């Protein structure tokens, strides 16, 4: 019996071209499986849920907003409708503006019926290097984010971020 017969079959059983195609498919499948498993492990190791404290600065709101958000309220991102975390601290002060008097003197004055509020929210987010994702949104200091609690909706600026180790 010849190694390759007159029809191009190896030992008269299978065509050498068909064997090459089967081997190529097997090698590609094994390589794809190897790469996929390594990528899943890398993603699992790189995206870690960590406790994050985020400070929101809400400027110039009325007492209705201030009175309707309390420590313990759950805050969501209005765009994704996913939970950001729980309000752990609320600091409220009068809204102030700087004015220049006719004499040239610079003075800070309180704006009646307007308040500045800082909300401290504790939640869990995906931390990957220098990226922090809460409620499927990238969080960076200076970004505006529309948030809502059970009673209010407002658009504060992210004022501070802290990853709790």
Image: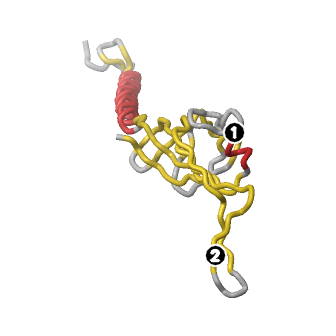
Q: Which residue is mark 2?
A: 107
Res 17 seen here: no
Vertical placement of 9 versus 53: above or below? above
* Residue under the point 35% across and 18% down: 9
| Image quadrant where one finds the N terminus | top left
Q: Which residue is mark 1?
A: 68
Badge 2 marks a residue whose secondary structure is strand
Badge 1 marks a residue whose secondary structure is loop
Vertical placement of 134 versus 10: above or below? below
How far apart, in angstroms, are the residues tagged by discs 1 and 2? 31 Å
Between disc 1 and disc 2, the foreground one is: 2
Does residue 119 appear left or right of residue 18 in this picture?
right
Report which quarter residue 28 is drawn in: top left
* Residue under the point 63% across and 79% down: 106
Res 2 seen here: yes
Residue 7 tag number: none
Q: Residues within 10 Å of mark 1 (few under 14, many from 20)?
A: few
Q: Residues within 10 Å of mark 2 (few under 14, many from 20)?
A: few
Rendering coords of residue 61 (x, y %): 71, 52
Q: Answer whether labels 1 and 2 touch (C-beta < 8 Å).
A: no
> In this view of the protein, which residue sits in the foreground, 129 or 39?
129
Vertical placement of 132 versus 45: above or below? below
> In this view of the protein, which residue sits in the foreground, 76 or 99?
99
Vertical placement of 97 versus 106: above or below? above
Rendering coords of residue 10 (x, y %): 31, 18
Colour option used = secondary structure
Sequence order check: which comes first, mark 1 or mark 2?
A: 1
| Image quadrant where one finds the C terminus | top left
Rendering coords of residue 124 (x, y %): 47, 35
Rendering coords of residue 102 (x, y %): 73, 85
């Amino acid at each position: 019996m010849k190694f390759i017969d007159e029809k191009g079959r190896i030992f008269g059983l299978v065509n050498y071209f068909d064997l090459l195609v089967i081997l190529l498919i097997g090698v590609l499948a094994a390589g794809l499986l190897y790469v996929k498993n390594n990528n899943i492990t890398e993603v699992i190791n790189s995206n870690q849920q960590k406790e994050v404290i985020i400070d929101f600065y809400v400027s110039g709101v009325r007492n209705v907003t201030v009175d309707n958000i309390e420590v313990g309220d759950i805050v969501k991102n209005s765009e994704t409708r996913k939970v950001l975390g729980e309000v752990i601290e609320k600091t409220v002060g009068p809204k102030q503006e700087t004015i220049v008097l006719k004499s040239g003197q610079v003075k800070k004055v309180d704006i009646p019926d307007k308040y500045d509020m800082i909300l401290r929210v504790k939640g869990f987010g995906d931390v990957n290097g220098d990226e922090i994702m809460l409620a499927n949104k990238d969080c960076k200091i200076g970004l505006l984010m529309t948030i809502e609690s059970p009673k209010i909706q407002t658009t504060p600026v992210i004022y501070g971020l802290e990853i709790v180790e």
